Image (cartoon, coloured by chain):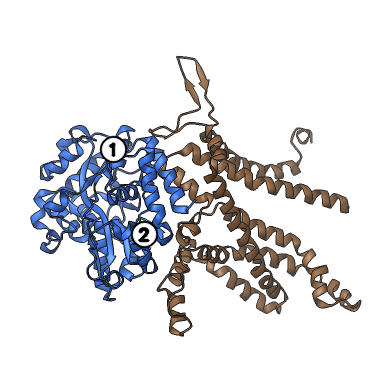
Chain colours: A blue, B brown
Amino acid sequence: MKKMFNGIKYLLPALMLSGAAASSAEELHVYNWSDYIAEDTIAQFEQQTGIKVVYDVYDSNEVLEAKLLAGRSGYDLAFPTARPFADRHIKAGLYQPLDKSKLSNLGNLDPVIMASLADIDADNKHLVPYMWGTTGIGYNVNKVREILGDDMPLDTWRLVFDPEIVAKLAECGVSLMDDPTEVFVAARAYKGLPTDDFSKSAINEAADTISAIRPHIRYFHSSQYINDLANGDLCVAHGYSGDVLQARDRAAEAGNGVEVAYAVPSEGAVVWTDVMVVPADAPNPAAAHQFIDFLLKPEVIAPITNYVAYANANTAATDLVDEEIRNDAGIYPPEQTREKLIVLKTPSEREMRDMNRTWTRVKTGQ
Amino acid sequence: MKLKQYLPPARNLIIAVPWFWLALFFLLPFLFVLKISLSEPILAQPPYLDLIREIEDGFVTIVVNFSNYQLLLEDSLYLSALLGSLKVATVSTLLCLLIGYPMAYAIARSPSHWRLPLLMLIILPFWTSFLIRIYAWIGILKGNGLLNNLLMGLGLIDSPLEIMHTPLAVYIGVVYNYLPFVVLPLYATLIRLDLTLLEAAADLGCRPWKQFLLITLPLSMPGVLAGAMLVFIPVMGEFVIPDLLGGPDTLMLGKLMWIEFFNNKDWPLASSLAALLLVALILPFVLLRHFERRAEEAAA
């Protein structure tokens, strides 16, 4: 549902502007996650540059990856997650190196985040960080408290992996992401096991943990929980920080009495970065550079963070972000939480395949 | 007159048009799929190795790799997905026939000025996007959706029924969506049925239910078969409905193909699955045609 409405929402400004511009106007084809930009960002860029933006959205890295691997996607700019996706795309030669002379605002970026990307992208040649966040737990405060009592700590993976607790929550709904890497790493963090091990035995250990709670899981999905948390159809969701916070805001706007909260589990949670890339076969790389540089402006990226509830990688923009969002521990986690965050190791192709097969078995209860 | 001798007969030309169509839009794409299914996956663009490779200048070798098919036969996951798809397709086809037959029968027997509006009621939902109709079912079936709120409002149930994300939801979605494919061919056969046959049977003292079993049902079998095929074949490869309405334990071939293609980036294995699915669908169809023809010949 979300995807369709977005398509319309983003197309409208483009359509209105294209009426005015000549048909020979320069075009930029952007492929981004759904709900991942502010409402007026594109219109502003079009007004300033006269470039017509054709904006499409996806809801999983896999869909973007398939288009890039097939080649001639026609997109000039995309927003994959750095690990493991952009990492292996660089190895497969899918991106072109950026022309940094055209990115005058590159200095605004957080040097710590830039350094954290250097091991997968030497000298930050291909990747420019856009937003970052964590993968934790979103929950319906009232319902979960009602079932588990007031004393139970809620910032723990036990909410989705402890069979006793999940059994109690099952009736009001528990969901896991449909992403083997995220779920296996979370399951291993819950057990206190090393999270950079993707050997067969490590995968099987994690699979056992998940199999034990699988009968109580309502569904495995990586975006559906946004609506369901907001409507009160779901009690606990394993999900992306910003998505859960969007669910919280939607519930508050609807005034339906549903209170949603986000927690970074104390056992550790995955921290991820989404990056901007220009595909090797992009038809208009020059316009893509212009758009990247536009998004690197503090006054452009700050309102996006306000709108999508994800932290941007732009140090210069932090002061421009709404105070409420800047001080939200779910969006800009405090130092002691940041220490516990897990940076994903990219699994090898062999490990990835083992993980995906095991994942299908676990999900279907084979 | 001379020219005519060299041209193929007009009849062959007319038959050639659909054959050409099939070759261009069915055979050719299938050969692409078959080619990919015999290669190996790599991390590159495109993500598979070409079958024809140049080793040294001028020397060309063709490397064919059957390991994908071997894996499909060895790994029980694919067999259970095939069985899962077979089960959903069979049950939905039967349900569609059970519900669709009385509908088609009633429309065919209704006064003639009623038939068009009734048929329109069957066809009209198709003017809405398929995806929107399935999303509408999510709104109806979910925990605090229309159905549960109605039943709870009437006091019939205390807590919401769990229908979303269960096999029941998949059957509801599939039967709803494919029902017109059964009703329309059945209606077409039933409306052509010669009613004097039934009158003659009645004159000779045949009871109505026996008239139906001995005359109407056998004569409508072509419609039943056509309808069953139109449901069974697409449901075998159905992906969207089980993905949106089904739960984690709904394992079907379409979903497995998606996983191989998108999650594993294994285009060769996904292609082998597609090729096997096609064989699994075409084989029974060819056999059926074969037996039909033999029956026709025997009758003649």
Amino acid carrying label 2: it is: Pro
Q: Would you place residue A225 above or below residue A25 in this image?
A: below
Q: Quadrant of the N terminus of chain A?
A: bottom left
Circle number at residue A7: none
* Residue A117 position by quadrant: top left
Frontmost residue, A133 versus A166: A166
| Residue B18 position in % (x across, y down) | 66, 45
Q: Secondary structure at mark 1?
A: helix
**Chain for mark 2?**
A
Q: Residue at x 46, y 63 (%)?
A: B165
Which residue does the numbered mark 1 point to in the structure image? A87
Q: Farthest bottom residue? A: B154
| Residue A184 position in % (x across, y down) | 34, 47
Q: Secondary structure at mark 2?
A: helix
Q: Earlier in the sequence, mark 1 or mark 2?
A: 1
| Residue A226 position in % (x across, y down) | 32, 62
Amino acid carrying label 1: it is: Asp
Frontmost residue, A44 versus B64: B64
Question: Seen in the image, is A196 located left or right of residue B53?
Answer: left
Which residue does the numbered mark 2 point to in the structure image? A163
